[in-house]
Amino acid sequence: MDRSTFLGGSVVGVLIRLTILSIVVGIVLSALGITPDNFFYQINVLLRRIYDLGFGAVESVLGYFILGAMVVVPIWFISRLLKTMRGPDDAAPPPR
């Protein structure tokens, strides 16, 4: 693969198109009030929110786990106690 195929044209032509396109996009972003500092700040805020969302999901799952365990574990424990108190005499016969 040569350089012209990779870039999509001659080097000078590609540089001129990229320069013009960058200026046009810069004008539009400036009209919208977006500055380089503001842009990178917003990217930082976005990444921080995504990071917090991930740990928020883990916290929610942990909360559901604890809430469910408050019901499931005592029921399991009581059923084990009752089975132990029943002893081997009350156990069902082994399958044939």
Image (cartoon, helix red, strand yellow):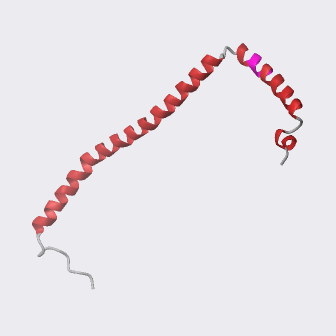
| Residue at x 13% of width, y 65% of height | 84
Out of 95 and 38, give the one closest to the viewer. Answer: 38
Q: Position of residue 76 (x, y in %)?
A: 22, 57
| Residue at x 34% of width, y 42% of height | 62
Q: Is residue 2 left or right of residue 46?
A: right
Q: Is residue 48 left or right of residue 96?
A: right
Most distant residue in the bottom direction: 96
Residue 30 location, quadrant: top right
| Residue at x 79% of width, y 19% of height | 23
Q: Is residue 12 left or right of residue 32?
A: right
How many numbered circles does the render carry?
A: 0
Q: Position of residue 89 (x, y in %)?
A: 11, 76
What span is colored magenta in the figure? Answer: 24-28
Q: Is residue 26 magenta?
A: yes
Q: Position of residue 71 (x, y in %)?
A: 25, 48
Residue 28, placed above or below residue 87: above
Residue 31 location, quadrant: top right
Q: Is residue 86 magenta?
A: no
Magenta span: chief secondary structure: helix
Out of 52 and 61, give the one closest to the viewer. Answer: 52
| Residue at x 20% of width, y 80% of height | 93
Residue 10, placed above or below residue 77: above
Residue 6, placed above or below residue 74: above
Q: Quadrant of the C terminus?
A: bottom left
Residue 73, placed above or below residue 23: below
Residue 75 location, quadrant: bottom left
Q: Is residue 7 left or right of residue 86?
A: right
Q: Position of residue 94 (x, y in %)?
A: 23, 81
Out of 42 and 78, give the one closest to the viewer. Answer: 42
